[in-house]
Image (cartoon, rainbow, N blue to C red):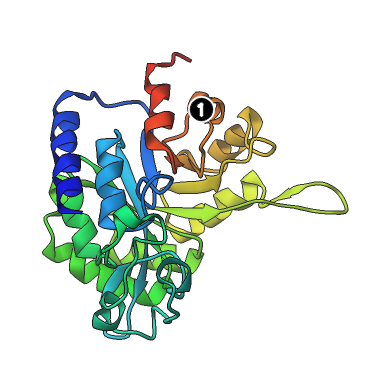
Amino acid sequence: MYIMRVWISLILLLFVCVVPSSGQVIVAHRGASFDAPENTLAAFDLAWAKGSDGVEGDFYLTRDEQIVCIHDRGTKRTTGFEKSVEDSTLAELRQLEYGSWKGEKWKGEKIPTLKDVFKSVPKGGLFVIELKSKAKIVPFLASQLKRLETGKIRLLIISFDKTTVAACHAQIPEVRTHWLTSFKKDKENGAYHPSAEEIAKVVNESGAAGVGMNGNRQVIDETFIKQLNEGGCSEFHVWTVDQLKDAEYFKNLGAFGITTNKPALIGKIRSKVK
């Protein structure tokens, strides 16, 4: 694991020096999670080595008020042992191993804290923080961010919970937030919800800077984006996009960012012309 980390770090240094910025931000979903165990430092390091402009991680508040990076409420899927994240202490969660489920070469990965992930972000990189513990985590996030050198990187906070987004806007106004939403199809009339108008309403009421939508091409088109803009929502990103043709489609619609499990593949849109 140590040799692998050194190798990734060398590639990262080379990448930071030679790769230009792009119009769209390519964000690695839970790190380079197609290849490495999600939400681990190995996955985040690999994401930068593969050319990501940013990384996205999921964060919960533990029983002892620490902020840790993991997607599920419980640890069973990624460790083999069931513990409730919010009901456990950091020390208890650190006793588990989070890498070998993805492959033996990843064995030894521990659950990272917010600070751990923050420190792994290179200068100028985008750190996307998805809050899973809802509004109760916000004061602790605000406190930690004040102690970190946030001026060296870019930050974006995201959440599916509009109350959490509003709390971030109120308590951490210097950091942009996006409200997250997916789409559901009405079985009777075939309409998708939320509509562009409904999304814009939530964005405006919560103080969000924009919206993050699942990359559904049946919903998101030029008309939909125009309706978002007319409603006062001018910034959007899409998730989780793993096909190059889909990434190009959303690039042409003006997506601020494209979140993917495959940053090396999706990063190829940088060379494509609208």
Q: Residues within 10 Å of mark 1 (few under 14, many from 20)?
A: some
Residue 8 visible in the displayed image: yes
On screen, residue 148 above or below 6: below
Q: Residue at x 40, y 70 (%)?
A: 79
Q: Quadrant of residue 169?
A: bottom left
Instruction: Assign a secondary structure to mark 1.
Output: helix
From this viewpoint, which residue is outermost toward the top?
Answer: 273
As shown in the figure, which amino acid type bears the numbered disc 1? Leu
Q: Which residue is drawn at 56% across and 30% down?
A: 246
Q: Nearer the viewer, residue 216 or 5?
A: 5
- Image height check: is 45 above or below 224? below
Side (left or right) of 3 relative to 109: left
Q: Please give the name of the residue rendered at 32% of the width and 85% of the height, measured from the top-left corner.
A: 63
Q: Quadrant of residue 164?
A: bottom left
Q: Residue at x 54, y 57 (%)?
A: 202
From the viewer's perspective, tell me whether residue 74 is left or right of residue 7.
right
Q: Quadrant of the N terminus?
A: bottom left
Task: Indicate the position of residue 197 as horizontal and vertical percent values.
Answer: 63, 47
Count of marks, rendered view: 1
Badge 1 is on which residue? 244
**Residue 155 in view (yes/no):** no
Q: Position of residue 217 (x, y in %)?
A: 64, 35
Foreground pick, 214 / 191: 214
Q: In this view, does 267 lie above or below 109?
A: above
- Measuring from the top left, give residue 8's x and y in whole percent: 20, 41
Q: Is residue 228 left or right of residue 189?
A: left
Question: Please, is residue 231 above or below residue 264 in the view?
Answer: below
